[in-house]
Amino acid sequence: MNGVSCCGHFRETTGRHTGAIEKPSAEEFVMRTRWITMTAISGMALAGCWQAGASAPEGLEEPIARQSYGMGALVGSQLSQDITGVDRAAFVRGLSDAMEGRELALDAPELTAAVADYEAGRQAAFEEQIQAVAEENANSGKAFRDAFATEDGVTTLASGLQYRVLKEGEGENPAPDATVRVHYRGSLIDGTEFDSSYAQGEPVQFPLARVIPGFSEALSRMSVGSKWKVVVPPELAYGEQGAGPHIEPNSTLVFEIELIEVG
């Protein structure tokens, strides 16, 4: 398994799971730039910004002018998404001064401080947004678990883990250090599926010691042949950190787990 299951529930992660970005090669950079450029041109054409047969706008009659304008529009479009909350006039002034080689209005220490202040403000806003999401998920998750606890056949353990037996097996129970083979489906409380071995067409195999606590706690109580619906509170899943683009901080997770084999 190389330390990471395809289901993404190992505590160890790779760049693919954490969103780490590898530095592209020169060839990759060129290809990516070409793709972005063509996408931007296609988007403008579809939006009616480019009309075949129309005369060139004033000042853009020459190819170099059109090329320059196109690149400026492309860069500006990207910057408008990446750089927010700025004084646009001052931003354009700084950009123009730097590109034209003029003396900058701020010296090096002032520039460093200004950029640091901007980044600190963005980071604070980001953390505030994440905190709001985490609180919302904690509240909605608790409400979901409270409701699930009242349903017929649901068991709530001291840890907070909840389960309902869908099919009772007759095989052995895995030891804490066992390797198991399972089919599973993972979803959020709104039903959004974020992972599934069924979708991959085959079960997965992994050591119990290397999956999230809620997953291993449930499996350690299951016997081979069992199929359970399991509700995992955030403290037994990915907690305040979340995982990847789909599992937000403080997410309660819902699994359907089928224990096929203990290895």
Image: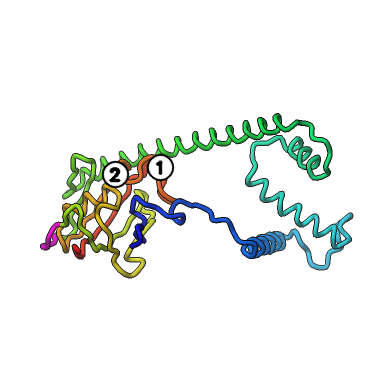
- Do the residues bearing badges 2 and 1 touch, measured as CB atoms within 8 Å? no
Q: Nearer the viewer, residue 217 or 158?
A: 217
Q: Can see residue 238?
A: yes
The residue tagged 1 is 241
Q: Say which amino acid is labelled 2.
A: Leu
Quarter holding residue 143: top left
Q: Residue 16: x, y in percent?
A: 46, 56
Residue pushed farthest bottom? 201
Q: Say which amino acid is labelled 1.
A: Gln
> In the image, is residue 172 above or below residue 144?
below
Q: Residue 200: x, y in percent?
A: 36, 67
Residue under the point 23% across and 60% down: 179
The residue tagged 2 is 236
Q: Residue 98: x, y in percent?
A: 78, 41
> In the image, is residue 101 above or below residue 223?
above
Q: Secondary structure at mark 2?
A: helix
The magenta-colored residue range is 168-173
Q: Residue 192: x, y in percent?
A: 39, 54
